[in-house]
Image (tube, rainbow, N blue to C red):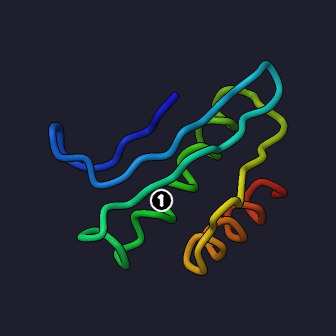
Amino acid sequence: MVFVAGPAGAPLGYVTVARSAREASTGLIAVAESARGQGLGQRLVLRPLEFARAGGRTRMSGSRRGATAPCESCMKAAASMSSA
């Protein structure tokens, strides 16, 4: 599954999510250069968490391959939410 942010026909970012019966996992995430620094990346990281909870998933994981410093802070925020 892919969550896309931005107006139709002009996406500003996306995040991919894989899911199984009990777990969801984030994969790729990207934010357009013009949209960086506005919190879009953080919202994209948090969206799969909301999706996982709504679907009754009990585990959430993600990849950190190639993560940047802003992405690292988003992943830490997501980790704290997933343990709540």
Residue 45 relative to residue 9: left or right? right
x, y percent for residue 9: 15, 38
User: To which residue does mark 1 refer?
Assistant: 43
Q: How many marks?
A: 1
The image shows residue 66, relative to residue 13, as above or below, that is below
- Seen at 77% across and 31% down, the residue is 57
The image shows residue 33, relative to residue 18, as above or below, that is below
Residue 45 relative to residue 61: left or right? left
Q: Nearer the viewer, residue 20 or 57?
A: 20
The image shows residue 73, relative to residue 63, as above or below, that is below
Quadrant, the C terminus: bottom right
x, y percent for residue 52: 67, 36
x, y percent for residue 39: 41, 71
- Seen at 36% across and 53% down, the residue is 13
The image shows residue 57, relative to residue 61, as above or below, that is above
Q: Amino acid at mark 1?
A: Arg
Residue 79 relative to residue 1: left or right? right
x, y percent for residue 11: 25, 47
- Seen at 58% across and 74% down, the residue is 68
- Seen at 44% across and 38% down, the residue is 3
Question: Residue lying farthest left?
Answer: 9
Q: Secondary structure at mark 1?
A: helix
Examine the image and state in which quarter residue 83 appears: bottom right
